[in-house]
Amino acid sequence: MKTFWMGLLGVAAIGAAGTATADSGTEVYKNACAVCHDAGVGGAPKLGNKAEWAPLVTKGKEALYTIALKGKPGTAMMAKGGRTDLPDADIKAAVDFMADRVK
């Protein structure tokens, strides 16, 4: 049942045209990413920590999207942060949300 409701959260965050909205990035972060990125669990760069994000951000958004969508071998980062039920657009919106916090 939890998966059903979490799936609905992902669907609700999608705009009418099937693309993620700015709000979906915030919501996906809160519901899927914060569990690791708020506290730095498993070496996850903490939200807003410029020093931890710098090596990743310098690679560009496409590289960040690839890591988020496919996972990062040798780390705790799994594909889509383990939320494979979410559309790629929502995951990318969450990446945008996190990256924007370290500009």
Image: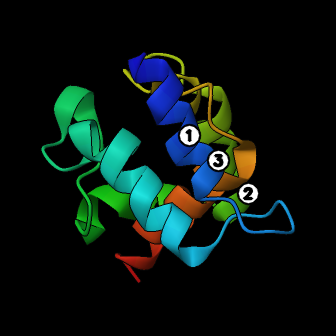
Circle 1 residue: 8
Residue type at numbered disc 2: Glu
Residue at 47%, 20% (x, y): give it: 3
Q: Nearer the viewer, residue 45 or 84?
A: 84
Residue type at numbered disc 1: Leu
Relative placement, left or right, of 6 versus 48 is right
Residue 36, image x, y percentages? 25, 37
Circle 2 residue: 62
Circle 3 residue: 11
Q: Nearer the viewer, residue 56 or 87?
A: 87
Mark 1–mark 3 CB contact (< 8 Å): yes
Residue at 42%, 59% (x, y): give it: 27
In the rendered structure, which disc, 2 or 1, sits on the residue that comes first in sequence?
A: 1
Q: CA distance from mark 3 to mark 2?
A: 23 Å
Relative placement, left or right, of 55 versus 10 is left
Quadrant where the image shows the C terminus: bottom left
Mark 3–mark 2 CB contact (< 8 Å): no
- Specify the quadrant of the image occupied by residue 48: bottom left
